């Protein structure tokens, strides 16, 4: 378990998540931390967290059995979670560059938390362990009292945090994940501190389930505890639920391909055992049905990057 310094320094009045991004930008522009912030202690904490992260990544005591429901995956679709429990030991292996991409993302997220502290905002409850109906997880933190997940994203994914549309386009189950933490903490307000790891842009997206004017009420209205109980029933079945998405046409050839969300799934060959991959100029395309052989090279599935 990571050891974290809960909070470094003192906040000034009116430090909230609403002005967090502005304060971080001001910090990196001026290189001056607000009065009362122990910058050296924040730097030491950042260094210790990075060391803990690397120890965790390269621990020899890791279990190879990943067939568990966790708060971090509970927001995923039913078929995905059924596969987690029944097929995790036979899923696609991650390529080395993918591991590096994930590690880089974790490092960037630690950097973002350091900047938050150095900008004078209050960070508490880092990696606090919680449990809901037998499903465990570790929340990222609370920032200025608001339950917060820290995310490093692509430029495409960043847009959903920037414009608030995550509620209606959440393929990785971020909402289900944070609602689980919120259920354990008995709060209805939570948010995401997100960074575009390609260009350094930062944003903070906050949802408040009790806000009568929120546009996402229909998406967030479910009870996280009830959702977890339902999923436990789903994964206990020997029969898989329906696929997360059906395949879609690939142009006018009669061929059919994976839904874009399924193309990133490590269980795609389990759901689609006859899957084939082809190297198009736009990137690899996974065909579920080939009526007309594509006039592009076929790629062995295990070599798709």
Image (tube, rainbow, N blue to C red):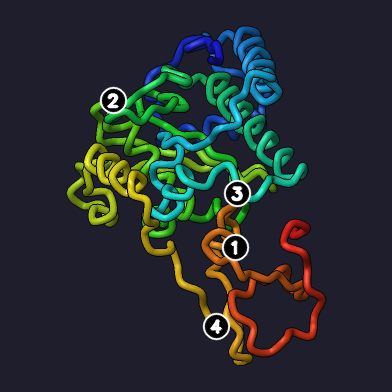
Q: Give the Cα distance between marks 2 and 4.
A: 44 Å
Res. 221 visible in picture: yes
Cα distance in 3D space between marks 4 and 3: 25 Å
Residue corresponding to mark 4: 249
- Please name whichever residue, 133 or 237, is drawn nearer the observer in this view of the structure: 237
Q: Earlier in the sequence, mark 4 or mark 3?
A: 3
Q: Which is more foreground, mark 1 or mark 3?
A: 3
Say which element carries label 2.
helix
Q: Quadrant of residue 169?
A: bottom left
Q: Are marks 3 and 2 in contact (CB under 8 Å)?
A: no
Check disc 3: other Cα within 10 Å, few if <14, some if 14-19, many if 20+: some
Question: Sequence order check: which comes first, mark 1 or mark 3?
Answer: 3
Q: Which residue is mark 3?
A: 91
Q: Residue at x 45, y 42 (%)?
A: 85
* Element assignment for label 4: strand
Name the residue beneath numbered marker 1. Answer: 263
Mark 2 or mark 3, which is nearer the start of the sequence? Answer: 3
Q: Which residue is mark 2?
A: 185
């Amino acid at each position: 378990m990571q050891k974290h310094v809960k909070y470094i320094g003192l906040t000034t009045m009116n430090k909230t998540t609403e002005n967090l991004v502005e304060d971080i930008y001001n910090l990196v522009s001026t290189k001056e931390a607000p009065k009362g912030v122990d910058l050296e202690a924040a730097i030491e904490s950042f260094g210790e967290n990075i060391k803990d992260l690397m120890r965790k990544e390269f621990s020899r005591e890791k279990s190879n059995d990943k067939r568990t429901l966790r708060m971090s995956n509970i927001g995923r679709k039913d078929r995905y979670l059924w596969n987690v429990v029944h097929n995790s030991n036979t899923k696609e292996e991650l390529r080395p560059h993918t591991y590096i991409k994930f590690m880089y993302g974790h490092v960037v997220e630690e950097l973002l938390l350091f900047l938050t502290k150095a900008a004078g905002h209050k960070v508490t409850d880092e990696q606090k362990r919680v449990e809901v109906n037998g499903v465990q997880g570790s929340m990222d933190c609370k920032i200025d009292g608001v339950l917060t997940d820290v995310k490093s994203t692509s430029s495409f994914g960043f847009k959903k945090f920037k414009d608030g549309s995550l509620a209606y386009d959440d393929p990785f189950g971020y909402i289900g994940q944070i609602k689980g933490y919120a259920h354990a903490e008995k709060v209805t307000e939570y948010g995401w501190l997100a960074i575009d790891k390609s260009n350094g842009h930062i944003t903070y997206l906050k949802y408040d389930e009790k806000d009568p004017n929120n546009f996402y009420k229909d998406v967030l209205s479910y009870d996280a505890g009830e959702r977890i109980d339902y999923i436990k029933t789903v994964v206990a079945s020997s029969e898989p639920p329906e696929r997360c998405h059906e395949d879609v046409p690939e142009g006018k050839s009669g061929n059919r391909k994976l839904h874009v969300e399924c193309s990133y799934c490590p269980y795609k060959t389990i759901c689609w055992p006859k899957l084939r991959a082809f190297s198009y100029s736009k990137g690899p395309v996974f065909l579920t049905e080939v009526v007309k052989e594509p006039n592009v090279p076929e790629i062995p599935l295990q070599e798709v990057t």
